Amino acid sequence: MAKPFVKWAGGKAQLLRKIRENYPIELGWRISKYAEPFVGGGAVLFDILNN
C-alpha cells in the first residue's frame, strides 16, 4: 500500500519551528498585515496570532 509523502496538503504544523526562524524582527509592531493565499490549516497564521 502506498503512503502519501505529505500528511495533508498545505500542512505546516510540523514545520513551525523552522518557519519561526524566518519571521521578521518587525513582526507584531511594524508589520500589521499578513497574507497567505493557501492557508491550509492556518498553522502559521495561528502561530503568529498566538505569539
Image (cartoon, rainbow, N blue to C red):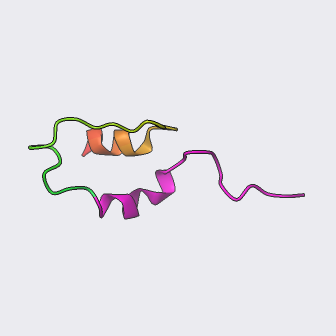
Q: Is residue 19 left or right of residue 28?
A: right
As drawn, the residue found furthest toward the left would be 29
Residue drawn at (44%, 38%), measured in percent from left and top?
Answer: 42
As drawn, the residue found furthest toward the right would be 1
Q: Is residue 48 left or right of residue 37?
A: left
| Place of residue 37 in the rendered image (x, y in percent of width and height, measured from the top left) | 43, 36
Q: Quadrant of the N terminus?
A: bottom right
| 34 lies above or below 6 | above
As drawn, the residue found furthest toward the front would be 37
Q: How many marks?
A: 0
| Place of residue 4 in the rendered image (x, y in percent of width and height, measured from the top left) | 74, 55
- Residue 5 is covered by the magenta coloring: yes
| Place of residue 44 in the rendered image (x, y in percent of width and height, measured from the top left) | 38, 45
| Place of residue 5 in the rendered image (x, y in percent of width and height, measured from the top left) | 70, 59
Q: Main secondary structure of the magenta part?
A: loop
Residue drawn at (85%, 58%), measured in percent from left and top?
Answer: 2
Residue drawn at (20%, 56%), measured in percent from left and top?
Answer: 24
In which quadrant of the rendered view does residue 50 lie? top left
Q: Is residue 13 left or right of residue 51?
A: right
Residues in magenta, as a range: 1-22
Residue drawn at (34%, 45%), measured in percent from left and top?
Answer: 47
Q: Nearer the viewer, residue 33 or 45?
A: 33
- Residue 31 is covered by the magenta coloring: no
